[in-house]
Image (cartoon, rainbow, N blue to C red):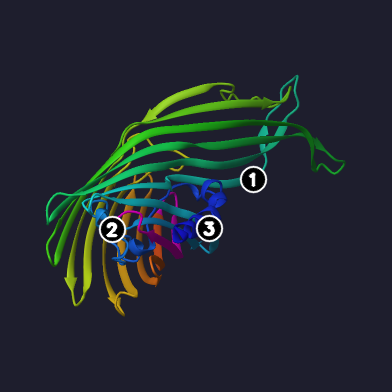
Amino acid sequence: MRNILLIVFFSVSFCSEYYFSLYGAGEKIITSNPSNISLGWSNLFSSNDYIKSANLSNFYLSKLVRLSVSTDFNFSSINNLNYYNQKMNYFSFLIPLKNQKHGLGFSLSPYYRINSNIIESDYSYVSGNVDTDPLAYKTEYSFSGGPSIASILFSSKINSKLSFGFKFDYIFGSLYSHIKHNVYNINYDMDGEILYTSNSIDQYTSIKNYSGYGLKLETSYNTFKNKFVTSFGLLNQTQIKDYFYDDIAPGSLELGVNYDNKNNYTISSPIEFNIGYSRLLNEGSFILEYYLYKPFESDLYILDNPDLNKSKFNFGYHKQFSNNKFTLGSGFYIINSYNNSIKSNKQGFTIGLGLNMIKYITADFCLEFGKNKIEFSETLNENYVNLYIGLSASDRWFK
């Protein structure tokens, strides 16, 4: 129990980051344990065999109750502009059931996240007429929040070689958008230079509430040296309730936004497919994996950033040393993402270290180096370095 409480304290210390310091410009967050990431962002395998939650169909193998959390630190450079970000990535709680034949789990992770403040540097103008003077304005945008996923997991052994698992997802959360127009009168000084004097402030708030469900199924076939894993995931239609709140001052721009209103709409289901193979090799394991993701049919826009079709190929190798006291793993991946207007090619290398520090407590570290070529209205070249840190604590609650 002391080990579990230690990890609870670690996770609580990041709660404000996890819920409110949100990630990127409406970007879909891919959550995983560092021991999975070290194998080239594997969705199905782990470099640390002590963590049995690496794939959904096999976490029943753990004899212990296990709590896992992870966080990451991200640094990237896009066309010589530098960005830094840190966030809570993942939380899971797994319980073995009935003589190590079944397992039950719970996890919580962000799905889409945004925390952005944008201030326009240039003025926009509204022309006047006989009765009104021309106006200028600058706009400030503030975005925060996004949907998260809470999951219930179940894993079960069918026979000595075959097992399966499923995961039920509940999507929830809110995205907050605040837009403010700072309006100015236009005047001229004696030299003909433009003078801007404050006129009024127009502002409104939008709150999007998300709710939806999803299901993931996975099967695993194991022999002494080989393991085959397949998974299929489907999210049910996600409902979005969009509320608008107006705070427009008299005599302001009145730009025609539909204020004081509520819009309800749904977005179609994304699907994902994963297949992987693992083989014991030179007292370690080699893994090979392919992942395919088809997004929401109607674009899910958070700050005008749509979801993308995605395919991923990755491979990796890991080996344990010193009587399983520590593990080394490394991997490589290629990820291609696209839609009608955006194309991205991402390639990266990962290397990880797993430490079984004291009884029932493990720590995992992973470094990721990569580059991303993004083709949009212009070509962007991104280079990035990410550090992932995970802690896992176990305890024996049942005999």
Q: Residue 286 in the image: x percent, y percent?
A: 21, 69
Q: Which residues are magenta?
A: 375-399
Viewer can see residue 55: yes
Q: Residue at x 48, y 37 (%)?
A: 173
Measure the C-alpha gap from mark 3 to mark 1. Answer: 20 Å
Marked residue nearer the N-terminal end (3 or 2)? 2
Instruction: State yes or no: discs 1 and 2 in contact (Cβ < 8 Å).
Output: no
Q: Left or right? Give the position of 303 relative to 185.
A: left
Q: Is residue 258 shown above or below 32?
A: above
Q: Which mark is residue 119?
A: 1
Residue displayed at 62% across by 36% down: 179
Q: Secondary structure at mark 3?
A: strand
Residue 275 appears at what percent x and percent y? 20, 54
Circle 2 — which element?
loop
Q: CA distance from mark 1 to mark 2?
A: 51 Å
Residue that lies at the very extreme toward the bottom in this rendered image:
322
